[in-house]
Image (cartoon, grey):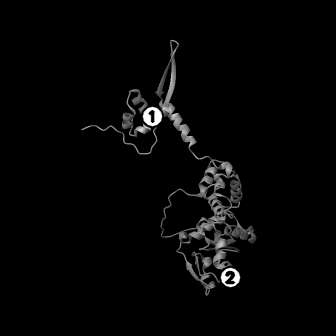
């Protein structure tokens, strides 16, 4: 049985430095290109191209007479290959999209993420396709420090946890006492379809303060509220009676914030302007109102880059 010494290699892979060294050795021994191709595991045309790429014409003088030779050098072939690979990539668009990048930096300072800026620009037709770059390219420019924005400015990227979270069940859950809660708090409600945010600064995290705020919200939005889902905090103890005749009230299971994922995600965005540990006693209602407007006027990818206010107005006519 004839021995098959052909190397099995993946199709479509370019020659490596090691394979070029093997080609040089076999070529020096006088093997034909076809036999070399069989030994390396490529087609003969690949060897023909490779020999042509790495062949160098040399001249030697012996006793005043010139002798010419054509020899294959794997280092020369590798150098020419590397040079061509560098030239085959698409040229950078950086210098051609500077107007878009200026717009990107301006909007980023308003709290918009790179994806929101790129997506909304496409939806609104602010730039032609060749005048802007994708979200991935924006992140690449930031990583390469080609913009005045740095990775440390990307809140979600720097705060993203890479650790595997394991949920543990306890017979008894302990936490800080209710007496440790701050005097003033922000009450938030999210309309799930449009992600429209309603924020109110209230005097305390108690049932009376929540009831007072809900009466005002009920007066303004009661005709479009179908249901409310709240957590099991004592501040919502009277919510069912306050919303009686207006909407149904549901309560999430204790210690399961995942059941109110939309609200939790919005709370993280609010903390960019009102971080944990900040005393709200000195915060004016106007600041809370401006944060509310900022979030409601921020396009979202899940809304096809529309803003919550645009969709909320469209759905509810408010």
Separation of disc 2 and disc 1 at Cα? 80 Å
Q: Residue 67 at what x, y percent from top left?
A: 49, 19
Q: Residue 316 at what x, y percent from top left?
A: 65, 79
Residue at x 66%, y 72% (from the top left corner):
310
Q: Nearer the viewer, residue 267 or 313?
A: 313
Name the residue that disc number 1 marks: 20
Q: Secondary structure at mark 2?
A: helix
Q: Residue 224 at what x, y percent from top left?
A: 63, 81
Instruction: Name the quadrant containing residue 223.
Output: bottom right
Horizontal side of 97 relative to 253 (left or right) equals: right
Residue at x 60%, y 77% (from the top left corner):
234
Q: Nearer the viewer, residue 302 or 10?
A: 10
Name the residue that disc number 2 marks: 215
Instruction: Name the quadrant containing residue 40.
Output: top left
Q: Nearer the viewer, residue 165 or 149?
A: 149
Residue at x 63%, y 67% (from the top left corner):
267
Q: Earlier in the sequence, mark 2 or mark 1?
A: 1
Residue 306: mark: none
Q: Residue 132 at what x, y percent from top left?
A: 65, 55
Q: Residue furthest left?
A: 1
What is the quadrant of the N terminus in the image? Answer: top left
């Amino acid at each position: 049985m004839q021995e098959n010494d052909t190397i099995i290699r993946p199709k479509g892979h370019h020659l490596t430095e090691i394979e070029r060294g093997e080609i040089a050795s076999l070529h020096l021994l006088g093997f034909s290109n076809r036999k070399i191709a069989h030994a390396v595991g490529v087609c003969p045309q690949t060897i023909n191209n490779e020999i042509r790429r790495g062949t160098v014409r040399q001249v030697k003088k012996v006793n005043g007479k010139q002798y010419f030779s054509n020899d294959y050098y794997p280092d020369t072939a590798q150098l020419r290959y590397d040079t061509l690979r560098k030239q085959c990539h698409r040229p950078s668009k950086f210098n051609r999209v500077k107007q878009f990048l200026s717009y990107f930096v301006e909007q980023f300072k308003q709290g918009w993420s790179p994806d929101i800026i790129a997506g909304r620009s496409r939806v609104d037709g602010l730039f032609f396709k060749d005048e802007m770059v994708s979200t991935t390219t924006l992140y690449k420019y930031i990583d390469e420090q080609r913009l005045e924005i740095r990775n440390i400015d990307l809140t979600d990227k720097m705060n993203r946890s890479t650790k595997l979270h394991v949920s543990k069940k306890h017979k008894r859950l302990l936490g800080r006492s209710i007496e440790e809660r701050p005097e003033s708090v922000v009450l938030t409600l999210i309309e799930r379809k449009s992600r429209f945010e309603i924020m109110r600064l209230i005097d305390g995290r108690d049932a009376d303060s929540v009831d007072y705020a809900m009466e005002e919200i009920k007066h303004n939005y009661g005709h479009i509220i179908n249901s409310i889902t709240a957590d099991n905090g004592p501040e919502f103890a009277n919510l069912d009676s306050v919303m009686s005749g207006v909407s149904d009230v549901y309560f999430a299971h204790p210690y399961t914030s995942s059941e109110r994922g939309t609200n939790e995600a919005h709370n993280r965005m609010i903390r960019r302007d009102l971080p944990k540990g900040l005393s709200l006693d000195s915060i004016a209602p106007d600041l809370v109102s401006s944060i509310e407007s900022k979030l409601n006027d921020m396009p979202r990818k899940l809304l096809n880059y529309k803003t919550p206010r645009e969709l909320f107005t469209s759905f509810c006519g408010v």
